[in-house]
Image (tube, grey):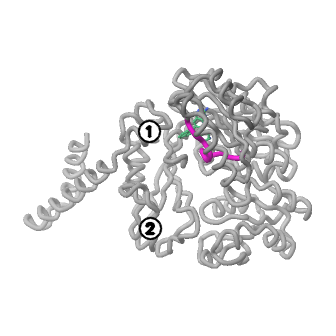
Amino acid sequence: MNKILVANRGEIALRVMRSAKEMGIKTVAIYSEVDRLSPHVKYADEAVCVGPPASTESYLVGEKIIQICKDLGVNGIHPGYGFLSENAAFARAVTDAGITLIGPSPDAMEVMGDKLAAKAAVKNFEVPMVPGTDEAINDIPTAKKVAAEIGYPILIKASAGGGGKGMRVVESPDLFEEQMQLAVSEATSAFGDGSVFIERYVGSPRHIEIQVLADTHGNIVHLFERECSVQRRHQKVVEEAPSAVLTPEIRESMGNCAVNVAKACNYVGAGTVEFLLDEHKNFFFLEMNTRLQVEHPVTEMITGVDLVKEQIKVARGEQLSFSQEDLEIKGHAMEVRVYAEDPKNNFLPDIGTLQTYQRPGGIGVRVDDGFEEGMEVPIYYDPMLSKLITYGKDREEAIERMIRAIEDYKVAGVETTLSFGKYVMQHPAFTSGDFDTHFVKNHFDPAKLDETNELEAEVAAMLAINLMSKGKASVATQAASRSKWRENRLS
Ligand code: MV4
């Protein structure tokens, strides 16, 4: 495999290309007309325009992508995440064209893409699952009986759903019929498949996921957990590795379960097994994602493993570069997703030009992004600008480094979620580790962001007046007194 096409855009396209380049592999970029000037296009050895801005006419058109591979002598495709990364039909078409997909088999994608099929596949592998039904529910009276046996509150889930789509919490029996009918009609319109199942609702769960890696020689390892509980409308916004609450025993048990889930579907490549952790530290298998995830860098930072390089080696038929015993957690990594959204205005996506775009740097700071200063933020795609990742000897250092990196990250021209990331890093519920998937609902107050910003504006004004009235006092002493003063005000 000496030339790969990255069937994606933005930060993940650039991230994949960097690792491929280190392996001496040529890269081909695809881009839509609006992405012509993107960094991943400039970075690739070759680049081909794949169509107009709309994803359905560009990044999602599998036939065009495969044709480009044939035209340019490409022998591997890395799909990244999103787009066609979990599309079994595309995976089959790639293989049929004699090209290697850097990812799992189409069968594994299909099994894990159907939440009920995933539960059935995993059933005999001693993996704890939330009490609930294993089959799709068709008639409501039977469903109501099962719900009573499970015990309220229950959750109705669409079998073809995932990532929180098609889920309805039902608090009591009298609400069951109505919610059941709504769930089935929603699943039918959203996924073209109305089959639903029910589970006991785990009220205040943490969302913990385990990274797995499997080669074509039967070797499967896990690369420990990522805590992804700080989410907004099922969109992860802050992730970290390792979790602040897992004990070594739970980590080992959860890791072994994740390896068993991979075994259950003959998994090959990098994948993620999602669990819920309840307040008593019981964990339950939720689903498996058959792609490299957005948040994979925090795992890379604590293990030293380049997951994209491992994906490529596995796709080339090589054995894993390490055994389970070789892997250990060193330090702590934190990730804040930087979206072009306004956290003071219900995270409304913002558009515009990056008038200012200066990345932070220094020890333990990694920025995975797909933008340069002066670029337009396109409206056609996910509004994520970058992932800001920090690494420290422990969680405290990773957090303080993240705060410093956020303060050093200069973006003007669009609103971003950087201030929200800093809010989370400084919130006692987060710093104490005492949070769950309801963190944003329970602890985020947008007004507080204004307070911090007003405070900073006040300090800047006072500094300006001070400097002007006293002439050019030494800026260093002024800045030192400012940050001390602000520190006191914020604590
Ligand atoms: C659950 C759950 C509680 N109880 N299932 C969310 C998306 C998908 N990964 C499955 N998810 C959940 N399934 C049971 N039986 C809680 C979640 C969940 C969640 C739910 C609401 C709001 C945010 C959430 C974040 C992660 C997981």
Mark on residue 439?
1
Seen at 65% across and 73% down, the residue is 41
Viewed as shown, does residue 334 lie left or right of 288? left
Q: Looking at the image, is 126 positioned above or below residue 103?
A: above
Q: Residues within 10 Å of mark 1 (few under 14, many from 20)?
A: some
Viewed as shown, does residue 132 lie left or right of 171? right
Label count reads 2
Establish whether ligand 1 lies closer than 8 Å to the Cβ of label 2. Answer: no
Q: Looking at the image, is 432 positioned above or below residue 372?
A: above
Viewed as shown, does residue 44 lie left or right of 375? right
Query: Of helix, strand and loop, which mostly describes the magenta segment?
Result: strand
User: Mark 2 — residue?
Assistant: 357
Q: CA distance from mark 2 to mark 1?
A: 29 Å
Label 1, secondary structure: give it.
helix
Q: Toward the viewer: 104 or 38?
A: 104
Mark on residue 167?
none
Residue 121 image-quadrant placement: top right
Q: Residues within 10 Å of mark 2 (few under 14, many from 20)?
A: some
Seen at 64% across and 23% down, the residue is 150
Image coordinates for residue 427, horizontal then vertical, percent:
36, 39
Task: Find the magenta span and give its range.
Answer: 160-169
Image coordinates for residue 336, horizontal then vertical, percent:
49, 49
Residue 164 in magenta stretch? yes
Label 2, secondary structure: give it.
strand
Residue 115 in magenta stretch? no
Quarter of the N terminus within the rendering: bottom right
Quarter of the C terminus within the rendering: top left
Q: Quadrant of ligand 1?
A: top right
Q: Toward the viewer: 8 or 93?
A: 93
Query: Which amino acid lies under the numbered mark 1 shown in the image of this protein?
Result: Phe
